[in-house]
Amino acid sequence: MALSRLASSSSSSSSTVGSKFLKPLTAAFSLRRSISSDSNPITIETSVPFTAHNCDPPSRSVETSTAELHSFFRQMATMRRMEIAADSLYKAKLIRGFCHLYDGQEAVAIGMEAGITKKDAIITAYRDHCTFLGRGGTLLEIFSELMGRVDGCSKGKGGSMHFYRKETNFYGGHGIVGAQVPLGCGVAFAQKYSKDEAVTFALYGDGAANQGQLFEALNIAALWDLPAILVCENNHYGMGTAEWRAAKSPAYYKRGDYVPGLKVDGMDVLAVKQACKFAKEHALKNGPIILEMDTYRYHGHSMSDPGSTYRTRDEISGVRQERDPLERVRKLLVSHEVATEKELKDMEKEVRKEVDEAIAKAKESSMPDPSDLYKNIYVKGYGVEAFGVDRKEVRVTLP
């Protein structure tokens, strides 16, 4: 099955770009130096067409560069290794509580960032580690937060489900199913009110797609033409329930009825980039739009779910072989002679070392002081450091 291919063109300029892109590597070629300086545009066509509802779909021809493809591979390899490491830390009981992993879905987080800017806002559910990394967070902040340490992005108090990064407009990880969608529409309202010329991406899963609050928020977003983009990350299983068992209409990109929608191959980072760029332009001019990202998670719903009781191992391995987002980018780089297999494997070794170093440093981070339980509860200067009455003055006399 074709993944992505270099778009053909009869024009002389396109021919020049294509020949430069396909030029064989020399023995002295330095991958990192050469790719990082090569920003010449390359046109690649997505393997799967976009499917549109109440709008014209964007072009399948996506502009990229060798530098961008290189960055896609490195980011995706980092996210993949990070989530695999989180799995091991959870099993070692260094991560406690809920933990929802994102491996398999990395193309959504990376492609979305490639199509927008940090001025645009993102809000998502509890599967949020990779989204935080894409917004500019660090591995140290991620692993510290996962292990409940003070160097975490939420000072060790939020854990896996509650990552935030205010400086790049990442409004979190939310544990209540679907609750982030009306909050995201509220952020979009603020953007329109302030005339920011920015949009909000509110992400949710197919399991949350039947939530009433989603349709209520979408209704008012459409009435007020808010720059809100609702993104259904359809990994085909809401916890352990297949989409066809939970939704009479699993065509989630059409669920907005009066709101336009677009179905996207969420395992193709370039398709995601093109769709998010298109959605941003649409939302700024016309109001909300729905994106359905057809993706897949390799882990279970959470670490307490083996993920193999409601789907077969053959199904999981089949997706890995045919649609894996990391392997798609690897094949693009190798087949067009932008990088060799050895160079990419060396890069993955570097990534593994970076992840291991971040984990080691996170383990050295201290646990929050018990007094931190009382911080960020009341407005400074108001209230007391405990719920209820001032217990220092309470005396109980028993009869």
Image (cartoon, rainbow, N blue to C red):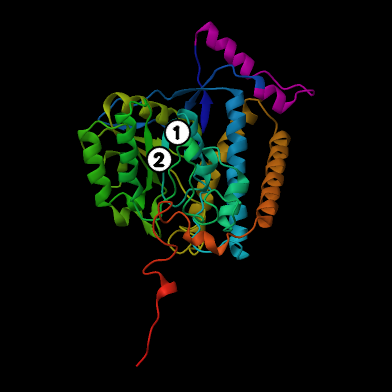
Q: Position of residue 284 (x, y in %)?
A: 32, 26
Extreme residue toward the bottom, this view:
399
Q: Which mark is residue 272?
A: 1
Q: Position of residue 179 (x, y in %)?
A: 33, 51
- Viewer-closest of 279 and 330: 279
Whether residue 135 sits left or right of residue 244 in the image: it is right
- Viewer-closest of 363 and 126: 363
Q: Secondary structure at mark 2?
A: strand
Q: Amino acid at mark 2?
A: Met
Mark 1–mark 2 distance (CA, rounded to whole Å): 8 Å
Q: Amino acid at mark 1?
A: Val
Whether residue 56 sits left or right of residue 114 in the image: it is left
Q: Number of marks in the image?
A: 2
Label 1: few (<14), some (14–19) or many (≥20) C-alpha neighbours in 10 Å: many
Is 13 included in the stretch rendered in magenta? yes
Quarter of the image with the C terminus is: bottom left
Residue pictured at 44% horizontal, 39% vertical: 266
Residue 225 visible in the snapshot? yes
Residue marked by disc 2: 293
**Relative to residue 202, is residue 8 depicted above or below?**
above
Q: Which mark is residue 144?
A: none
Q: Position of residue 211 (x, y in %)?
A: 28, 52
Whether residue 35 sits left or right of residue 375 in the image: it is right
Q: Position of residue 213 (x, y in %)?
A: 26, 49
Tags 1 and 2 touching, CB below 8 Å: yes
- Viewer-closest of 74 and 122: 122
Is 320 included in the stretch rendered in magenta? no
Residue 248 visible in the snapshot? no
Label 2: few (<14), some (14–19) or many (≥20) C-alpha neighbours in 10 Å: many
Extreme residue toward the front, this view:
393
Q: Which residues lie in the magenta part?
A: 10-36
